[in-house]
Image (tube, helix red, strand yellow):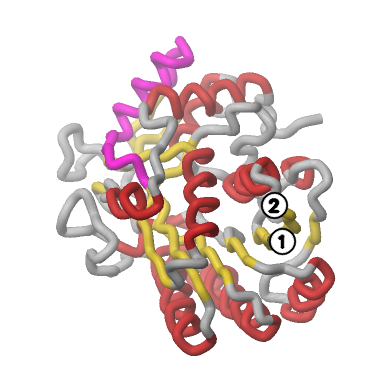
Amino acid sequence: MTVLVTGGAGYIGSHMVYELTDAGESVVVLDNLSTGQAWAVAEGVPLVIGETGDRALVQKLIRKYGVDAVIHFAASIVVPDSVRDPLGYYRNNTANSRALMECAVNAGVKHFIFSSTAAVYGNPAEIPVKEDAPTVPISPYGSSKLMTEIMLRDAGRAHDLKYVVLRYFNVAGADPKGRTGQSSKVATHLIKVAVEAVVGLRSKLDVFGDDYPTPDGTCVRDYIHVSDLAEAHLLALNALEKSPHLIYNLGNGQGFSVRQVIEAARRVTGHEIPAVESPRRAGDPGILIAGSQKIRRELKWQPKFAKLEDIVKSAWEWHKNFPDGYVE
């Protein structure tokens, strides 16, 4: 099988490429390198620089490499930025995804895995949140992803396109073999920001909001290791032959507040991390914890990095070895 990985030079995408190549699959990467890094793509894997919305390029790429499946990561992902620039997010996340789907359908590609987000749930009424919970996003980012899910559902029905939607919670950590990690200069992930403060790339860590209805007033999130997430994608790809339309949450099923994550980072690194209370960010829900029993039951997925400290440790090892976020 030949798999097209969009955004395959980015944080999650580069881990997915290694997961696929380690499993013996053939891979080609499409990435515009706006946040991705060419060095992050596994050796020997073709990297095509371009946009998912460039239909002529995507059609040519599918034909040239004989693509059988698409795993679609390419997207803008910063919630506050989506509030400031909603039209940019709808262009990059929704319109470009539509163009990519059209290319896949026209070329006869039958397998499509979509990188979605827990942001489609907004502020869920029940925690942990399950896949059948109402989807009422509170940010343009969440809406842009939900629109893509809807298009994929309808395209699946109309064109016999087999798909899996994977709704991520908070992804963190780095490849245990040290081959790739979180290297985007603009990333706002809490664990990444915490270890960057330790290695001197930041003077402080902002705690956005301390008045949420949570035990310590800060946001509570579910953290999943990026390698566990990549493994779930591979399981989902293999499951498509038997189950054509699937939606799964991807999280550990445990919630940790911002302050708890900071304390874990302090314990793991052995360093004090200056934390400053700051106003809430627009579009941030108070609590998001995954109900991930469905994927555990149906695909036999089991996270290998279930402890918060283990996730933080892998991120710390990456940033300690590559404090500038890239490999020379």
Q: Amino acid at mark 2?
A: Glu
Q: Which mark is residue 2?
A: 1
Question: Which corner quadrant of the image does residue 274 belong to?
Answer: top left
Q: Is residue 274 above or below residue 163?
A: above
Residue drawn at x 44%, y 56% as measured from the top left: 80
Quarter containing the N terminus: bottom right
In three-dimensional space, the C-alpha distance between marks 2 and 1, rounded to whole angstroms, equals 6 Å
Give the image location of residue 181, x and y in percent: 62, 35
Give the image location of residue 302, x and y in percent: 39, 39
Instruction: Judge whether residue 282 can be spotted in this image.
Output: no
Q: Is residue 228 above or below residue 107?
A: above
Q: Which mark is residue 25?
A: 2
Q: Amino acid at mark 1?
A: Thr
Asked if the stretch drawn in magenta spans residue 77, the answer is no
Give the left or right position of residue 272, taking residue 220 as reference: right
Mark 1 neighbour density, 10 Å: few (under 14) some (14–19) many (20 or more): some
Quarter containing the C terminus: top right
Give the image location of residue 278, x and y in percent: 35, 39
Identify the magenta region. 251-273
Residue drawn at x 80%, y 55% as measured from the top left: 47
Residue drawn at x 76%, y 78% as measured from the top left: 59
Please report whichever mark, 2 or 1, sits nearer to the chain's N-terminal start.
1
Element under label 1? strand
Give the left or right position of residue 14, taking residue 193 as reference: right
Marks 2,1: beta carbons within 8 A: yes
Instruction: Judge whether residue 43 can be spotted in this image.
Output: yes
Residue sticking out furthest to the bottom: 158
Element under label 2? loop
Q: Which mark is residue 62?
A: none
